[in-house]
């Protein structure tokens, strides 16, 4: 199997009993840890009105992480562009690129990252997602060199050409990424149903651009690694409970692991949660290595974005160390 770059998706989780301040401190510590391990990117995702996720002010958190690291690329996985005007995002990420040149990524999604009430609080038009392709192109224009007579420019931002990615969980984003010639990241860590179809559409329709000559696809993968399969399965009960809570419509703090997950959900909740968590590799170093190899062989992805929502911070760091040793970086 070829060596596939590995990256990290961090939701900046707030474990039950902790605070956002502790979550943000843990994220910086984890970023430094995975930087030393050789991971390529560290991405933060925009969510709103979720007590267990502290990445709402995504560009601020990116600055926090980038300022505390030195080599790893740091970025958004992603910014939900319909929540914002393109010029504001260009200014924010132009500022980040000016502070940390050559290290900033900007992944863009069209989902709200929130519920309907929060959408209203964000002053977001519920139909704004339909303007997503236009908004992406407007953002590209703000990052391009200033044209003669251009009356509105992003300062900083103009001429910086911050690398853009299109994020998605359906074939819509795949087709847009292909049309614009941008790298594509699929959210298979929570919405795996259309993974194969989206990757196929992206590769078949890709058009080269100034940013990218050939298609480049990344996919999210839940990986929970521990020294034994039993311990990894116990750690996995944390994301299982978190997704059960999403099925119930009651998102909360990141729950502690439990000994028997079947005591904590109904058959219907289990089916719903495990459908979202279908793309997960859980186990010992040997199990993780085999699982990541199988995922790469099946999908042919160019990079994997590893999501590891583990309650205990030390166990989360240990999981990423195992992934680095067995899942691609050490091959």
Image (spheres, rainbow, N blue to C red):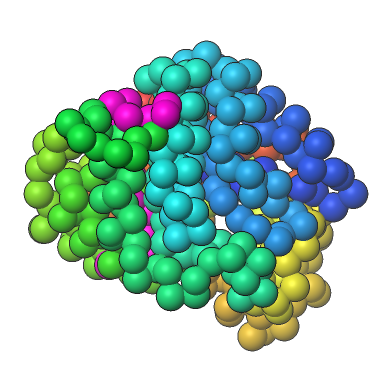
Task: Give the quadrant of the N terminus.
Answer: top left
At 64% from the left and 49% from the top, the residue drawn is 56
Image quarter of residue 193: bottom left
How far across and down, in percent of the image, does residue 236 sit? 66, 55
How far across and down, in percent of the image, does residue 67 sit? 60, 19
Seen from the viewer's position, the closer of residues 313 and 318 is: 313
Q: Is residue 303 above or below residue 219?
A: above
Task: Give the quadrant of the C terminus.
Answer: top left
Image quarter of residue 250: bottom right
Q: Is residue 266 magenta?
A: no
Q: Is residue 123 above or below residue 216?
A: below
Residue at the farthest right position = 17
Which range of residues does the magenta coloring cover? 155-171
At 9% from the left and 49% from the top, the residue drawn is 207
Image quarter of residue 260: bottom right
Q: Is residue 262 visible?
A: no
Predominant secondary structure, magenta span: loop
Q: Is residue 112 above or below residue 34?
A: below
């Amino acid at each position: 199997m070829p060596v596939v770059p590995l990256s990290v998706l961090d939701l900046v989780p707030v474990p039950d009993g902790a605070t956002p301040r502790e979550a943000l401190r843990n994220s910086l510590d984890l970023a430094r840890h995975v930087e030393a391990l050789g991971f390529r990117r560290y991405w933060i995702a925009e969510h709103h009105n979720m007590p267990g996720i502290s990445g709402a002010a995504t560009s601020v958190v990116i600055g926090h992480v980038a300022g505390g690291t030195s080599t790893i690329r740091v970025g958004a996985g992603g910014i939900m562009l319909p929540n914002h005007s393109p010029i504001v995002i260009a200014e924010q990420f132009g500022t980040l690129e000016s502070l940390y040149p050559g290290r900033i990524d900007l992944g863009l999604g069209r989902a709200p990252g929130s519920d309907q009430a929060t959408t209203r609080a964000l002053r977001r038009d519920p139909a704004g997602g339909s303007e997503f392709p236009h908004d992406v192109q407007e953002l590209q224009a703000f990052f391009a060199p200033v044209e003669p007579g251009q009356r509105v420019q992003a300062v900083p931002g103009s001429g910086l050409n911050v690398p853009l990615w299109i994020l998605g969980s359906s074939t819509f984003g795949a087709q847009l990424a292909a049309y614009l010639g941008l790298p594509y990241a699929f959210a298979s860590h929570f919405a795996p149903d259309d993974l194969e179809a989206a990757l196929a559409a992206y590769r078949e329709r890709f058009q080269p651009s100034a940013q990218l000559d050939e298609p480049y696809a990344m996919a999210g993968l839940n990986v929970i690694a521990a020294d034994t399969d039993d311990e990894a399965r116990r750690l996995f009960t944390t994301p299982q409970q978190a997704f059960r809570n999403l099925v119930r419509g009651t998102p909360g703090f990141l729950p502690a692991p439990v000994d028997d997950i079947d005591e904590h959900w109904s058959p219907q909740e289990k089916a719903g949660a495990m459908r979202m968590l279908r793309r997960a590799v859980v186990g010992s170093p040997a199990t993780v290595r085999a699982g990541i190899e199988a995922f790469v062989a099946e999908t042919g992805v160019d990079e994997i974005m590893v999501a590891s929502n583990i309650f205990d911070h030390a166990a989360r760091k240990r999981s990423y160390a195992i992934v680095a040793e067995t899942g691609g970086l050490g091959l």
